[in-house]
Amino acid sequence: MARLIYKIAPVTDTPAIVVRRLTKSYGPVEALRGLDLDVQRGDIFGFLGPNGAGKTTTIRCLLDLIRPDGGTARVLGLDPQADPVAVRARVGYLPGELHLEDNLTGRKILRYFSALRKRKVEWGIVHSLAERLHLDLDRPVKNLSKGNKQKIGLVQALMHRPGLLLLDEPTSGLDPLVQQEVLALIREAKADGTTVFFCSHIMSEVEAVAERVGIIRQGRLVEVADTAALIDRALHHVKVRFQAPADGNALDGVPGVTVLAHDDAQNFTLQVEGEMDGLIKALAAFPVISLETTRPTLEDVFLAYYQADDVAAEDT
Amino acid sequence: MVVPFYDVYVAQEEQMLQFIESYPPEFLAFFGGMAAINTPAGFLNSQLTTLPVVFGIFAVLAGSALLARDEESGRLDLILAHPVSRLALFGGRLAAFVAANIAILTVCWLGFCIPLSGSSMDVSWGQMALPFVSTFAVVLVFGTIALLLSMVLSSRRRAAAAAGAVMVAGFFLSGMANLNADLKPIARALPYEYFQGGYAISGLNLVWFGGLMAVSALFAALAGWRFQRRDIRVGGEGNLGLARPAFLSRLRRASL
């Protein structure tokens, strides 16, 4: 299976994406409310948020498909509004809602997009991508399933070996095997220096490939962190079984530890915020039969942000 | 069919005139009168009256769909994510639109020219081209109106309907103005009034032709200007409504 080699076309050494105080409204609806965002070159950046949070609006501003009301954006050091063609020449984009001309075959559509790129696409890469994604290029789009249309979208985003990939729900409609292949393609792109900025509702895939994540809520970035660090900062749940009855108060006093439940004096369910070191040291004073921890997922982190916001909203 | 029919008409002119005179005078006046119908220019004029409307239907539908069709279907988003400027895309589509209209009118012109060799109609191929040149200028105005409206109104269908209304209104007002002189100023504000019809074979009115082309250029430029500056629509995100001043948007948000 051929591995794709990506060309990097750095314009400057600035971050791949720099967004400052970006605002955008659709009539009375404020989609972006002063968004600040930095994505470093070569990163895989997961952009998370529920529907309507402003993810797609951000990407469309970066491509100059829509014009922000205020703020600035730079893509690979270029201003999308001042030089949209140069930005798009270096970017591969997969929209969240992919629409293709029904009467054309995948091959003809890709040839059209190749022509828009002044035929700077190596057709060997197209064939390699099609083979890896199990895509038949000679069937009319109208006869393709949603997943196969999505594959055409992925090929057109990757085929010119862009310096930056903007992917909006890249695995939408794909079967699990092809999803894994897409994640492999993303990792390969990153290995060759391409920056990947992608939105997804599938937290497990973001967790699997993204080194950094940003969480957007109502047009504002509420968190940006390394994926692993963000998960480590989240609440762990720990079940402890002692050999003999233990004093729960001794655990309650450990910084970051909360006793959630204890069926009896031997079985405790704890919630631990941050590092486990304090708890481990506290448990050393007791004879422990078993210790079971549940690692939080990115989904837990994401939901915690939104549940906390919902609670705050209800309180106000 | 029109050119061979001229020979039939000439051969049976007396009966034809009697037949035409049987029509109500208002009806004949609506179509510009039939006084010169026994001349090639008058005969062609009587046959080509509806030409701008027939070709205008294509121009309006194509003009309104030129960019808005891909935009409404969501395809424009992906096209413009490639290294092509909005101006280049607009220019390319506009050129294709103009070329399509020229191609259709050229085929139609050839259809009129080929039977000329076997006809008594003393008109050269070059002369025969002139009514089609006049038609092209009028049709281009209809198409560019539709294009401009598609850049401003919230849907392609509304743009086509509004441009179509201008086209049909012009046709009827020009005809009605032959019956009621008070309607003439209104008819003059609409493109159809500047269609020369068959009389163009005697010489193209370059002022009218130039004026129509200038109006088309103006509408196309306005459409291009609007396309350059506005957001590309995607399902569920805003619309193509006229730009609202920022303070009005702020007021509306504040009131919610």
Image (cartoon, rainbow, N blue to C red):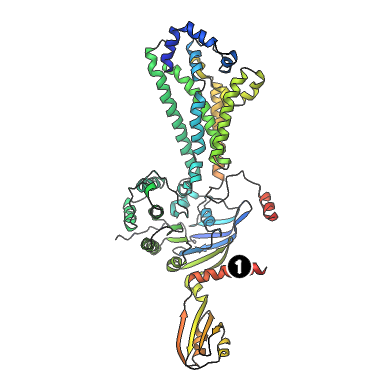
Mark count? 1
Say whether residue B68 is visible. Answer: yes
User: For residue A8, which quarter of the picture?
Assistant: bottom left
The residue most toward the left is A1
Say whether residue B36 is visible. Answer: no
Q: Chain of mark 1?
A: A
Residue lying at 52% horizontally and 93% vertically, measured from the top left: A245
Q: Secondary structure at mark 1?
A: helix
Between residues B102 and B156, which one lies in front from this camera angle? B156
Question: Dot 1: within a 10 Å radius of its alpha carbon, few (fewer than 14), some, or many (20 or more) residues?
Answer: few
Quadrant occupied by the N terminus of chain B: top left
User: Where does the image place residue B125, in percent across and percent down from the top left?
Assistant: 41, 17
Between residues B77 and B34, which one lies in front from this camera angle? B34
Report whether A146 appears left or right of B222: left
User: Where does the image place residue B130, in percent across and percent down from the top left?
Assistant: 47, 20
Amino acid type shown at disc 1: Asp
User: For residue A163, which quarter of the picture?
Assistant: bottom left
Residue lying at 50% horizontally and 66% vertically, measured from the top left: A213
User: Is residue A183 positioned above or below B220 on the image?
Assistant: below
Quadrant occupied by the C terminus of chain B: bottom right
User: Where does the image place residue A125, in percent across and percent down from the top left?
Assistant: 33, 54
Between residues A231 and A265, which one lies in front from this camera angle? A265
Disc 1 marks which residue?
A310
User: Is residue B122 positioned above or below A31 on the image?
Assistant: above
Report whether A178 appears left or right of B177: left
Residue lying at 57% horizontally and 47% vertically, measured from the top left: B239
Between residues B1 and B127, which one lies in front from this camera angle? B1
User: Where does the image place residue A308, in percent across and percent down from the top left?
Assistant: 59, 70
User: Is residue B205 positioned above or below A36 on the image?
Assistant: above
